[in-house]
Image (cartoon, rainbow, N blue to C red):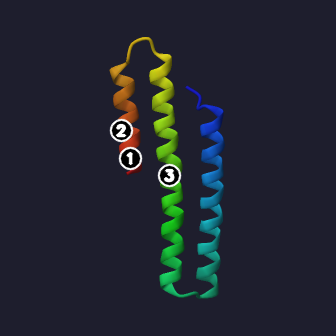
Amino acid sequence: MNFPESSSKDAIKRLSRAEGQVRAVQRMLEDGCDCRDIITQLTASIKALEQAGVRLVSSGLAECISKESSVDEDLVAEMEKLFLRIR
């Protein structure tokens, strides 16, 4: 299964944002910034990763179901497990 191009582009954008946020956390730790600011930035990076994952799983599920003439219950169960891992 491949993801639709629009989903891939959206995920790449979100992952790039998360990458920048993680780098910012590293810099903040090196610079001795306030712990509240570091936790805030770390939380933002975690949320960005979660959102990328949720979007990919939901897109993948929709893609799989739309291409199937009948719904494969095992595939749906597998996608649900992936989705729940993210949460």
Query: Tags 2 and 1 in contact by the CB under 8 Å rule?
Result: yes
- Give the SS element for disc 1: helix
Q: Label 3: how many residues lie within 10 Å, few (<14), some (14-19) or many (20+)?
A: some
Q: Amino acid at mark 1?
A: Arg
Quarter in which the N terminus is drawn:
top right
Mark 2: few, some, or many residues within 10 Å (few <14, many ≥20)?
A: few
Percent across and percent down for residue 49 are 52, 55
Q: Nearer the viewer, residue 6 or 28?
A: 6
Q: CA distance from mark 1 to mark 3?
A: 12 Å
Relative to 53, does residue 78 appear above or below in the rendering? above
Identify the element where label 2 is drawn: helix
Q: Is residue 3 above or below residue 20?
A: above
Amino acid type shown at disc 2: Lys
Q: Taking 12 as reference, is 54 left or right? A: left
Say which residue label 3 marks. Answer: 51
Disc assigned to residue 85: 1
Return the mark for residue 81.
Answer: 2
Of the two numbered discs 3 and 2 on the same chain, state the one appearing first in sequence.
3
Q: Percent position (x, y) of residue 51?
A: 50, 52
The answer to whether residue 40 is left or right of residue 84 is right
Q: Residues within 10 Å of mark 1 (few under 14, many from 20)?
A: few
Residue shown at the point (38%, 46%) measured from the top left: 85
Q: Identify the disc placed on residue 20.
A: none
The three-letter amino acid code for the residue at tag 3 is Gln
Circle 3 SS class: helix
What residue is drawn where x is 48% and y is 83%? 36
Q: Position of residue 24 (x, y in %)?
A: 63, 73
State the separation of the CA atoms marked 2 and 1. Answer: 6 Å
Find the distance from the CA under tag 3 to the CA under tag 2: 16 Å
**Of the residues tagged 3 and 2, which is closer to the observer?**
3
